[in-house]
Image: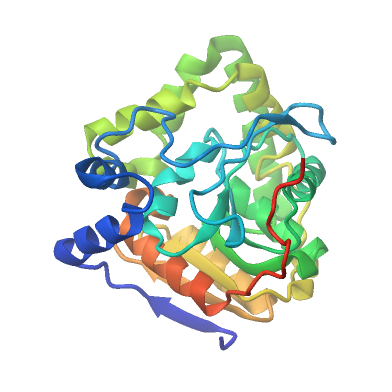
Amino acid sequence: MAAGRSVALAIPSAKNAAERSSRCVQTRTPGWRANAIASGAEREPGAMQTSRSPQRTSSSTNVAAKAWVGFGSAMGAPVTCLHGFTQHGDSWDEVSALVPGDRRWLAPDVRATTLVEAEADLLALWAREGVERSHLVGYSQGGRIALFVAANHPDRLLSLTTIGAHAGLEGEARSARLAEDRALAGRVEREGVDWFAAHWAGLPLFTGLARRGRAFLARLDAARRRNEAGHLAAQLRGLGAGATEPFWDRLGRITAPALLVTGAEDQRYADLAARLREAIPSAEVAIVPDAGHAVHLEQPVAFATLLSRHLTRHEESPCPGRGRRRG
């Protein structure tokens, strides 16, 4: 992959999308229900179509650390996905169903409230699951965590993919965002999760999600309301964009090939992706048409196509015993 390369992805036609969806999910669940799950039509909030590993305890924060493992062989290359603020690991269900191939998907609920805790939780998850190297995918808050881990542990990654991410705000932008996040944290604690869910859904950053329809928005709303006010406030204060110490100077340590995804309607993060591309030695930017900040939710087929190409291009055949769960 050539450094500094930008690509724009044309969204596949409806016919191609349907064909790809049925091929991707037929090994997970039979018949018509497979196609319905891939499109989101038959999935209740929080429902899973992949097998789930037992809930375990994080060694670093002593909280539940969940990991969802794809249906494929335990020898498949691991793909670890980190969700955004207010979301949960099951927000990656649709994408994992659309990406073909025999891979092992790990999508933990991010419970950490600082970058250092999040890094420790991820390393602990990989240790429990016997993962030596993994593809790492992160959206927004999860993208910051992914960049941080990639810079600190470059030998643990097969590839890196971020969506709407950056390595910390700086100067006045950081000061302003920190004040905003602290004020929002206080209001969440006072007014509760129901108020917050409505407030968060109304932010201009997420207007593009409306293209998925009312039923999809209702599922997102239900997922947001599964959160606890105290935990949301703690993440805003300790893991939010304003709280994150900038680590742009560490990005040159990243050795994994990186795919930096952004929506064509999200100019601010397109600019940040361009800056990331300059800082990461082997990186390319992919701009997805008709998408804003949450590309993988707004245009799941387009994103899955990009991710599939990236994973396949940088696959590694696991050594005997790699990828097997311990215990």
Q: Is residue 218 left or right of residue 197?
A: left
Front residue of this view, candidates 165 and 122: 122
On the rendered structure, is 4 left or right of 125?
left
Q: Nearer the viewer, residue 151 or 13?
A: 13
Q: Quadrant of the C terminus?
A: top right
Q: Quadrant of the N terminus?
A: bottom right
Between residue 66 and residue 138, name the one nearer to us: 66
Residue farthest to the front, as pictured: 320
In the figure, residue 49 lies in which quadrant? top left
The residue shown at (76%, 45%) is 326
Check the image and name the residue furthest to the left.
15
Q: Quadrant of residue 85?
A: top right
- Residue 324, position in %: x, y? 69, 53
Q: Residue 293: in sight, yes or no?
A: no
- The residue lying at 69 percent from left, 48 percent from top is 174
| Residue 16 to residue 219: above or below | below
Residue displayed at 63% across by 15% down: 189
102 and 14: which is toward the camera? 102
* Residue 157 percent coordinates (x, y): 70, 66
Residue 128 makes an appearance in the image: yes
| Count of numbered labels shown in the rendering | 0
147 to the left or right of 300: right
Residue 162 location, x and y as percent?
56, 60
Q: Position of residue 114 (x, y in %)?
A: 77, 39
Q: Quadrant of residue 207?
A: top left
State left or right for residue 156 relative to residue 277.
right
Residue found at the far right of this picture? 60
At x 62%, y 26%, the residue is 232
The image shows residue 181, relative to residue 137, as above or below, that is above
Residue 192, relative to residue 146: is it above or below?
Answer: above
